[in-house]
Image (cartoon, grey):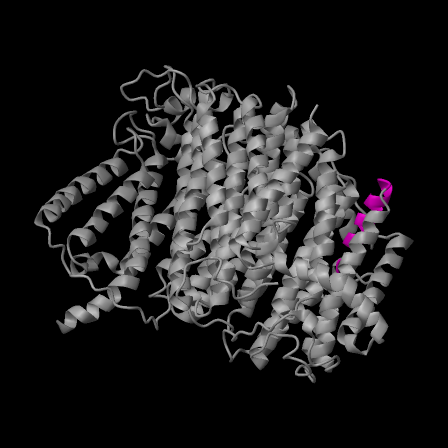
Amino acid sequence: MSRRARLLILGPALAGLGALFAWAIAGLPAFGDYRGPYGFVLNRVVVPLRHTTNVVMGTTFDVRGVDTMGEEFILFAAVLGVALLLRDETRSREVERRTGRLPNDAVRLLGVVMIGGCLLVGLWLMAFGYITPGGGFQGGVVFAGAILLLYVVGSHRDYHPFRDENVLDLLESIGAGGYLVVGLAALVSGSAFLTNLFGLGTTGTLVSSGSIALLNWASAIAVSCATLLLFAEFLETYVFPLDAEDAAS
Amino acid sequence: MSYLPYAVAAWICLWGIAGIATSRNLIHLAVCLTVTQSSSYVFLLSVGYVSHGKAPIFIGTKLGSTAVDPVVQALALTDVVVSVAVIALILALALDAHRLSGTVDPDELVDVSG
Amino acid sequence: MTWIPPLLVTIPLLAAAVIAGLDHFMPDRVQDALVIGVSAATTALAFLLLWDAESHEVVHWFGGWQPRHGVALGIDFAVGPLAAGMCAVIGLVVTLALIYSLTFLHEAAKLFDSLMLVALAAMCGFAMSGDLFNLFVWLELMAVAAYALTGFQVERLGPVQGAVNFAITNSLGGYLFAVGIALIYARTGALNLAQIGSALSHGSAGGLVIVAMTLLFCGFLIKGAVVPFHLWAADAYAVAPAPVCAVLGGVMTDIGLIGVARLYWTVFSVPFGHGHAAGDVFLWLGIVTAVLAGTMAFLQRHLKRMLAYSVVCHIGIMLAGIGLLDSSGLAGTELMFLAHALLTAGLFFVAGILHVDHGLIDELHLRGRGRGCWALALAWLAGTLGLIGTPYLGIYLGHGLLDAGASRLGRPWVPALLWFASALAGAALLRAGARIFLGWGDEDDPLLGKSIEEDPLERHVLRPLVLGVALTAVALGLVMSIVPGLGQRAEYAADRFRDTSGYAARVLHGRPLPPPQSLPVSIEHTSLESLLYGSSATFLGLGLALVGLYRRRLPGAVSAVAGRTVAPPIRVLRGLHSGVVGDYVTWIAVGTAVTGGVWALLLHG
């Protein structure tokens, strides 16, 4: 189809979809008028039953834990997929003419400070995920972002230890597999899959919420390693030629 | 005011689809796909909002006070991870397309058809 | 045996994690054994679950979150015999594909194996899940694995194009589905399918529910490659490696239809089930898909692309069966799924072997080269006859049940159209078989478009193994029509599946099933009409194949007339399947808007 034909067909189609959306929105309850029982019941029930003050994380890792298991494996599959798609060895790319280090000292200083800050925030989000806002996924991504800052601020040589795929693959599998093992442990002991079997501890402290804490950490490890692996795959397509150059210079 | 968030979500969705259908660059297309998906986050989170409700985190807040729906927040979290996965794959494919044919224009990337 | 459903998902995922993580420490042989073993074990567990699900609904509430006072808090897997049967066939096809790929794929084996196991787990989870958002999660998981597997041969542009088209169209479908979830959640405040159905039985079902239904179903129809959402399928299946095509085309596309059926009969039959309007849209979409895809199949020369259109054609027939909203129709779809999955997988395997043997995948280039490979020729012929529906082979019983349902509803023209479409797709495959294995036909045919050739993945495979796998798949698919007792059990499974209020009672309140009557173990009879239809379709397929082979020898006047009438529509059809993803997304927007509009007109008020 020519572009004009495509636009001529797309316009009315989108207008039709817009009309359908408007009709649906007219039937929605007003913004702020949430009526359904699901959220209200969980807000009342999760804290006393699971001793976790962050009801969103309680929902994510316990009540709807299977969704999160699937989600973790979506990220896992995406990492495998990107590795599969970018695996071609005989790449002949134009070498990117970039220097090894950023020339601007102010930016480098700011970056170094940010790395420390992001690392701490990431670790805090992971560790306290089931008590205060945060969680394994959010913390894992912030943590991985802090490590990527190393590449931006330093050179690829500083970043190199964090590109080691053997270690990262293993850790990511431990994280993803760990989630499954916690669930299977419940199944093997006779309860339903992913039942919260471990001691529930005291609400509001780090020792609380039973298996939610374990699942939180498992997903934190899996997500940070998966994100680092993704960065590693993409960076390899740019950094690889520079390695040879640096060796020559 | 009471229907504005939903209208915004619908607007985002429609323009995202328009962007995907008319894009000339795979990377731009991946971003349009993310934009379309963000309309689903806006829908989900607007649906779960409770007037004058606080976050469903009960440390410092008394248990039993009005809080918004935690379920849609968990759903939106999963949605975000799905979006990351898909955009990673499409960007990897864009890199491959550029390597093989020198272009990232989806209109030019036609090897099989009919 | 409520401990089985989570295992069907967990065991493959755990194995995938182990393979991906320990790849550098695990020897190849151990990895191969682990993959095949896990896949076979999952299939065996699925069969065990099938046997158990006959007598009661196997419901597993995750995390121990049982429903309280009829309100579901947790996520459940609710498995009846239909869902368990799907899991069993999925496991079977994936296991066969993994055995096939043992010597077929040497590079990136760890990535391939892990992704196939992830796809297996996701498809089983999708078949079993009783929660709306959980369905979305498994849908996206199988999609992500599929996009990557499609783009396996990254040295060529074709796979990249196919994977891009696949990824963009199906992701868009998933996001439309997510918006639909938000809308239906606003209306009902629940995510459990049984509970949404109960909630919709109070109050009116106005625009919100109709639009949510449109978005939810269109998301699944995009996955299920139904017209006008089907354009990505041929691009993707043409370029994926043969074992991946077997899984994608054999089971993954079909599972979108099972999602449609599940969603309809647990949720939307409550407000809209008293009329036929909702189902009629599916019926018509199915018929149009079947006929259009059958025609497109006939216009192909690339074997895998031809098979892709054959898959879409049968999807159309199966969707029509669902759209009849009748037990026989649904039972027919079930049986067709079982036979079609195995036969299609077998034919993709044969195409893969031809590709490896001769380095060619184009029907015209392969002309005559298959002479002497009697095993391959037999497999191709048997598979094709099974897919046409020659009486008592392959999909015949399923199609026969579908015919019974259609005539019971007073729509005798439905079977005629569907058998015609089946014949068209079969004609294409018969023509290709005759040209390749017998050397018949002209050397060139401009009707079939220009050549698309590609290199095979491997040149050295363990031929007895891959041949054995292909023959096993075709043989299993062929006998589906004559397995004693299968027809009756399929009808019972369909009855259970369609029982909306019974499902809600069993899932939400734990009410036990009434004890089933014992079912006869005999080959189900089909009507005389079905026998006639099946035989005519076979002859029509043979006739069209001969016309396709010897088109030049038709008398000049006939050719001229045919050329004038048939050429312009063919040009239009070809132009629509342009390979450009922007066009595909445009048609998705059109399809969603039109489907929504039709349902709005038919169901409002």
Specify whether residue C407 is painted magenta. Answer: yes
Residue at 44% x, 58% y is B105
Magenta span: chief secondary structure: helix
| Pick the front one: C129 or A115 | A115
| Pick the front one: C544 or C120 | C544
Left or right side of C162 for C473: right
| Pick the front one: C242 or C55 | C242
Indicate the position of residue B13 as horizontal and vertical percent values.
48, 37
Indicate the position of residue A113 as horizontal and vertical percent values.
12, 42
Left or right side of A188 for C375: right
The vertical placement of C25 against C124, above or below, is below
Indicate the position of residue A43 as horizontal and vertical percent values.
41, 22
Left or right side of C208 for A110: left
Residue at 66% x, 56% y is C312
Specify whether residue A183 is painted magenta. Answer: no
**Number of marks present in the image shown:** 0
Indicate the position of residue A11 as horizontal and vertical percent values.
55, 41
Residue at 48% x, 55% y is C145
Residue at 73% x, 33% y is C514
Is residue C378 something one can see in this rendering?
no
Q: Which residues are magenta?
A: C394-410
The vertical placement of C396 against C99, above or below, is above
The vertical placement of A158 against C505, above or below, is below
Is residue C106 something one can see in this rendering?
yes
Left or right side of A151 for C543: right
The vertical placement of B79 against C246, above or below, is above
Locate the C terminus of chain C and report the quarter of the image it occupies. top right
Residue that sits furthest to the front in the current view: A4
Locate the N terminus of chain C and report the quarter of the image it occupies. top right
Residue that sits furthest to the bottom in the current view: C372
